[in-house]
Structure formats: structure tokens, C-alpha cells
Amino acid sequence: MAIKILNILIVLFVPFLMLGVIKKTKAFWGGRYGASVFQPLYDFIKLMKKDFVISTTTSKVFRITPVIVIASVLFAALFVPLASSSAIVNIEAGFVVFAYILSFSKFFSLISAMDTGSSFEGMGASREACFTTIVEPAFFMLLASIMALSGNYTFDSLGKIIENAGGYGVLICIFAVLVLFIMILTEGSRVPVDDPATHLELTMIHEVMILDNSASDLALISWANGIKMLLLSSLIAAIVIPQGLPTGLSVLAYLALMFVISVIIGTIESATARIRMSHVFEFIFVMSSFALIVLSLVVARMFGG
Amino acid sequence: MYSRIFGMEVMNNFFIGILFFILSGFIASLFNKKSKITVLSILCFAGSLFCISPVLNILFGGENLVAQYNFNPVFGPINFVIDPLSAFFIVVICIMSLMGVIYSKGYLKPYLDKVKNINSHLIFLPLLIASMLLVVSCQNAFAFLIFWEIMSLSSFFLVIFESDKKDVLKAGIKYLVFMHISVIFIIIAFALCTINAGGYDFSLFSQSLKENSHLANLVFAFAFIGFGTKAGFVPFHNWLPDAHPAAPSHVSAIMSGVMIKTGIYGILRVLSFYATPSKALAFAVLIISVISALYGVLYAITQHDLKRLLAYHSIENIGIIGIGTGVGMLGLAYGQIQIALIGFAGAILHILNHSIFKELLFLSAGSVYIKTHTRDIEILGGLIKSMPFSAVLFLIGSVAICGLPPFNGFISEFLIYFSMLKCLAVKDFFVLIALLFSIAGLALVGTMAVLCFTKAFSIIFLGMPRSDNATAPKSDSEKSMLFPMGFLAILTLLIGIFPQYVFDVVLKPACFIANTQAIPYDSCANLMQTISLCAFGFIAFTLVLLLVKFKFSNKVEMHQTWGCGYDRANNRMQYSASSYASPFLSMLRPLFKKIFDIEKPKQLFPKSAHFSLHIDDIEEAYVINPLVKFDEWFLSKFEAIQSGNIQSYIKYGLIFLVLIIIGSLFIG
């Protein structure tokens, strides 16, 4: 029980720290001192207090979307294994529920962007919708392959790759982590897919969709985005952190892993530029091909010599 | 033959209901213009009550209803048996058709004065419902084909409601041709059964096919092509995207929501005859279904005609139903009865779900059409302000059709995913590969549906109006149109929140198809409970958050949309449907044929310029059209025969008779 409460607190607060660490890392590589790692939390509180500026073109859809987005992302957290425990709602085929709840939030963020009648936001929405069509099948293929290997259809199967896959275990783990990492970059709208720092509207994807959101709406959406990154990182944690560690150590390992992932994301953002829009598809397709590699490794393990 | 005639009196209620349907059109046409459709609705309501009341019990575990009629000495007695599979379809047909009929009151109002053949429309509408009910309850192959044909013909007359329009007539004739090609395959399938079984009754078919599995598979293959054409599986789907836009909205709703499902009914019925399909057949169904689903949703994204878009989505959903059926068949072929049950349960639940949300979407599309007089979504926009109820209902339908929680579409897709995952445990190379790709395929279909419906909803209802058509509506549709839509929307939500009860119901037909007694699958029932709780929690959580948000909202200041410093943005600068779909479509360029119609601006002060883009179905462009061209060419060779000269026609008759006599001499 205590661990579940701890997990809920992690879902609520660690996303701010992850965003803070990413910014700090970028400042470090840029030779700056940078803002405190708590800055995203301060921003959140500041935004919650502000007044709204809302476009006259918009309808109620625009007003309710931030709430739906945060509610569905928080609900999706119930289905994901977090620090040192299985998912709170640990059901078979839980990843389908997880992915479809996130799709639900995406549906609303897409129509909310279109609601403003702005061509910039339409552009962002159209790109975001397009990227999802590449990301989601790869995600499903990856998880279904891993689950076929262990015959366990809950998220617990992620922790059992090594014991089930024998000699292929390490390879499967590496590619699975890579798939999930590219998914974090895409869904969390980080460089090289998207650049959360730029203010040139034409090159942005997720950031441009929320151009017209203000005050608590903007705060909730940014928070939800952070939580989404945390949840996907938790899947990496489920693969990487060995099972059977003592609870305290396992929680520490989890938090350390979140820190490492944030630092890696920050480093990538400092070291590379955003990919040209027409090449972003190719980058995301790398994810599909890695998922295919996992699939073929699983098949090789199950039917190979 | 059936030794025991059970529940004859109860069964009579069913036939009284059908009689109500058949007569309602004739009675309604006697009334004056204003009350015609009200009378029709009341009669159809009564008919539905009569039909549903005796069969409902079967879905909760009651015994089958059987009735036998000895009309015809040649084809044997005609049996009507209502088993769980029939009962399920009867309930779906009655409820969904009734909603369509009620809706037609508001929808047909503008046509009452304009169109002359309104009475024939009102006669064929309930006739279609009655024939569908007879198709799913009749157990005699010969009678089945007769009812099937009545169904096709009555729906044909409904499609060509606005027969003065050339497009409508063309679409109607295409539909007619497709239906008659399909019925040939059904006849072949039934003929093979009849020769083997020595009778027309389905119970005889079932006995003989169980012993002869090669023949059974052949029969299933023919039946799949025949019924699959009705259902709209790729590559037999081509009539669908033409017929649905041509028909009035309530008719497209009934056709897409219910009628094409009779095709699925036929497939499931033939499967239930023997219930041990070969592995190859199971794979074939699975693969065709995945392709149908992907093809349907891909072309839906390319469409800007709202009803055409919805028609392509019917193909997608038929594909999803087919995936469930395919997994069920795989389960049967590999002897995994529990997996088969979940697969079939998913497919059957998706039949119900699709008929609910597709009907909801077609009806909302109709209410948009009645107010704006266009189906082209590119010139709509901002309708949520003038038609808030239609907008919300369309939104509910869109979310449900994308299979997103907490609505009903999610439950059936989840069951299908679950059956596929469970089926991975069959340690077979081909099963593993096929299923892993099907899972990814279904995920792709889901996200493409999201893309398509975010496009459709936001271009029609959100943003600024794009033309005069979009500013035309001053008020929302009439109550008689909104009521059926609201009812369907509530159903989508109820099934999404309480899946466990529906799951119990759909398990009965699933067991029937698999020819097995109900095997409870504990984990699945528990899953449904959990999902129900989660859905409930999710809705409650969201509502509380919304309440908090609007209760404690900070001050709101209205301002125009941020245009990066540009403050003269107008409605023509909005993102359009084609531009929204363009990044995705550009990835899949070879899969369709783009037809551009461009006039570039010329000279210094260009006067006229236009651009339009039309996307053609590749099957139509590369298969159907060449076939038709070949047909025309081939038949033109025989033009010489048709001289118009009566003497030469008599001469042909004479030659023919002589040939027959000579032939019979040789053969005899």
C-alpha cells in the first residue's frame, strides 16, 4: 500500500523534476548555470494563478480539453508498472487500455488545436496525428512480441525478458529500450522530432498545438506531457531494473533511471538539432524497424534452433 | 426434421411483428403528408416490440424457438428457428431500424412536397426491415435466397430515392449489379450443400457438412465471397462508397448499421454449420479482414464527402469484425475453443457496437446535410455554434468509432486484441507471425481512425465557417431527429461503462457458432468487471475535474486567435481537410490515384484560378473500370445481332429450336 501511495506521488511530482533536469542539462552543456530543477514546478504554480486569454473562435471543446488530457494521462498511469511494483490495475492486455487512453487524450488535444481555426495549430495537429500512426503500431508490435515470449499478457512480462529469452535476452532488451526511447522523444515532443524551446511556429509540432492555451490550461497540458514521458520511461525501468531487489533499492534505482533518461534527453537536445520535417518520418520509422527486429528475435527464440 | 415444435405461440408474436412491418408502409401511405411518417413510426415500433419480446429470452439462456411451415411441396417444409445467433441479429435489426424510421420523420420533411415517390419509399423501408428479419430467422436455403433477394431489391429502391439525379441512379445500379454477382456465389454455396445433404434445410446442411470437411471448406469459401460482398470486404467492397452517399441518410444508416451485417450473419451461419474450418481458411479470413480494415480507413482519410467517408469506415469496421471472426476461426482450427469464443464474442459485440455508432454518425451527417445542403466537408466549419447537439452527438460517435475508452467501440476492440494475444500461446510459427502483424495492423487502424475523425469533426464543427453553406443553419435539427441520435449516443456510453452484462449476452451467439456449450472464461469476465470499474472511475474523475475547473476558474478574457502577430486571419486561412490529411497521405502515395484539376493563376492580375483534388479508389481505377471497359468492348461485338428487324429475331428463334432438336437427338 505504502509503495502505491509513493508511486502516485512519483507520478504527480517527478515529471516536473524530469523537465527540470532536462533544462539543467541543456544549461550545463551550453555553459550556463541554468534555472533550478524545480523551475517547471514554479512555472506550473505561476500559470495556475493566471487569468485566461481565450480565442473568440473556440468552443467548449477547447475549454474542456486540458482537463480531459490530464485526467486520461493520470488514469493511464494506473495501468503502468512504476517504482518497485506492478501496475496498480495490473490486468491482462493492460497495454491496450494504456495506449487507448492516451489516444483518447490525443483525440481531444488534436480537435482542440483545430478548434482555434489557426493554420499553425492545424499544421501541428496534422503532424502529430501523422506521427502517432507510425508510433502506435510499433509499440503494439513490440509489446505483443515480448508477451508472446513469456506467455504473460500483463506489463509484468517486460521484467521477464532475460529469463525467457535465453541468449537473445540482452539483444531484445536493447532494442526494446531503443523503441521505447524513440517513443519518448516523439510522444514527449523532444529534439530531434520536435523542439519544445523554439518559438518559430512553423517548425513545431506539439508546442504549436497549444499556442492558444493559457493559464491553468497550459499548465495542465505541460504537466500531462511530462507525466506521459514519465510513464513511458517507467516501461524502460520495468525492462532494465532487475526484479527481486529490495523495495528501497528498487525505488532508488527507478529514480536514478528517471534522472539518467532526463540527462540523456538533455544531452541529445544539446548535441543535435531538430531533424528537417520531411526526415522526421524516417526517424520515427527507425522505431518501427527496431520493433520488427524485436519481433524477429522473438520468433528466432521461439522457433529457431 | 424437428420432431418437437416448441413455442409455436411465442413464435407467432414474431410473425405478427413481421406482418406489422410489411403492412405499415401501405397503411402509412394512406394517411396525409403530415402524419404519414408518424403512423409509420408507431407501426414499426409495435412491430419491433412484437419481434423483440419473444427472442429476448433466448439471449439470456432460454430455449430456441422453432416453427415449421409447409407451404411448398418441392422445397420441403420451411423452418424458422430462432437460436442465439438469430436472436442477437433480430434485436439489433429491430432497434437500429426503428431509430432510422423515427429519424426519417424530420429528415424527409423537406422532401414531402418535392418528391413524388414518397409513398413507395415508405413501403420499401419497412419491407427492408421485414426481409432482414426473415433472412436471419429462416432456416431453409431456398426461402433464405428469396428473402435475401427481397432485401437487396427493397434496399435498391431505397437507395434511388432521389432517382432524378444521375449519380444516384448510377450508384443504385452499381449496387444492384454487385448484389447479383454476390448472390451467384451464395447460390453456388447453397447448391453444393443441397446436393450433398439432399434437402434445403440448414439442419441437414449442418449434418452433412460435419462429415465432409473438404466440401465444408469449399462451401465456406463461396459463402464468404457471396456474403462478403454484401458485408463489404475488400476486394468486394466497391459498391459501398457509392451507394451510401446516394441514399438518404436514414437509409444509409440502416444499410450501413444493419443491412451489411446480414452479410456477416451469413458468414457466421455457414461457419456454424461445421465449426471446424481449415487452417488455411482461417488465415485467409484474418488476412482479408486486416487488409479490409486498413484499406477502408486509408480511403476514409482521403475522402471529403462526409457520407463517403463514413461508408469507407464501414469497410474498416467490417474488417475489424472479420479480424475477430478470423481469430475465432484460428482458435477453432487449432482446437483452442476458449480463444475462439473470445474472438467470436469480440466480433459479435463489434457488430452491435458498429451498428450503434455508425448509425449515430450517419444520422448526424444527415442532420448536417439537411441544414447545410452539402456533404463536402471542405466548405463547412464552425457548426458547433449553431448546431451544438448534433456536434456533441457526432463527437460521441467519432470517439466511439475510433475505439477509444470509455465508449463501446473500445470494449469490442479490446476483446479482439485480447483474443489475439491469447492466441499467441498457440505455438505455431504462422499463427505467431500473422497475429503479431494483425495486432500492429489493428493498432494502425485505430490511430488512422483517430486521424480521420479528428479531421472530420474539426473541419465540420470547429473553427470558423468556411462558406455560406456553413453559416446557413440558424438552429439545430428537429427533436424527432435528435431523439434517435441521443438514444444511440446513450447506448454507446452504456455499453462502454457496463461491458460485463453485454459480454454475457454476446457469449451466447459465440458459443452457438463454435458449436459448444458455454464455457465461462473467468479471466475475461473479470477483465470486463475491471474495465467497467475503470471506465466508471474515469468518467467520474473527469467530471469532478471539470466541475472544479469551471467552479474555480480564473478570469477569462476573449481575444482573437494568435496569428503570430498577424491579426487579419480569416476563414480561408484555416487548415483544410486535405491539408490536415496531407502529411499522412504523402507517406502512402502509391496506394491511391490522385486526380488533380488545376488552373494556375496567369498574367499580372490573375482573374480566375482553381485547384481541386480528387482521389480515386485504386480498385475502381485498375480493376473495375478496365473490366467494365472490356465488357463493353466484348458485348459491342454482338451488336450486329440486334438489328431491330422482327423477321431476323424470328429467324434466331427458328435456328435455336433446330439446334435444340438436333442436340437432343445426339444426347438422347
Image (spheres, rainbow, N blue to C red):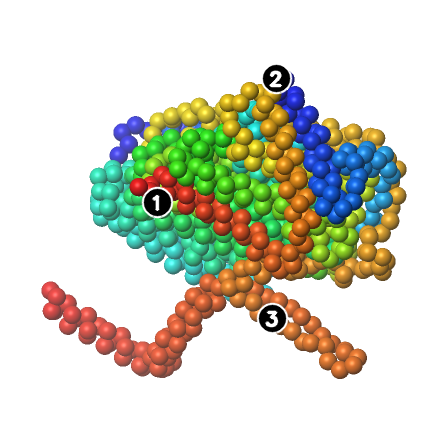
Q: Vertical placement of B408 versus B216: above or below?
A: above
- Where is mark 3, residue-wise? B596
* Quarter of the view holding residue B431: top left
Q: Vertical placement of B409 versus A116: above or below?
A: above
> Callout 2: residue from which chain?
A
Residue A231 pos. (x, y %): 62, 35
Q: Is residue A20 visible?
A: yes
Residue A234 pos. (x, y %): 59, 33
Marks 2, 1: nearer the viewer: 2
Marks 2, 3: nearer the viewer: 2
Residue toward you, B548 or B168: B548
Residue toward you, A14 or A155: A14
Position of A203 with respect to A3 (left or right) is right
Asked if the residues shown at circle 2 and circle 1 are in contact, with their CB atoms under 8 angstroms apart, the answer is no
Helix, strand, or loop for circle 2?
loop
> Callout 1: residue from which chain?
B
Q: Vertical placement of A225 versus B517: above or below?
A: below
Residue drawn 39% across the image and 76% down it: B633
- Where is mark 1, residue-wise? B430
Nearer-N-terminus badge (1/3): 1
Residue A1's disc is: 2
Asked if the residues shown at circle 2 and circle 3 are in contact, with their CB atoms under 8 angstroms apart, the answer is no
Q: Vertical placement of B294 versus A6: above or below?
A: below
Helix, strand, or loop for circle 3?
strand
Residue drawn 79% across the image and 48% down it: A212
Residue flagged by tag 1: what amino acid is it?
A: Phe
Q: Residues within 10 Å of mark 3 (few under 14, many from 20)?
A: few
Q: CA distance from mark 2 to mark 3?
A: 63 Å
* Quarter of the view holding residue A246: top right
Residue flagged by tag 2: what amino acid is it?
A: Met
Quadrant containing the C terminus of chain B is bottom left
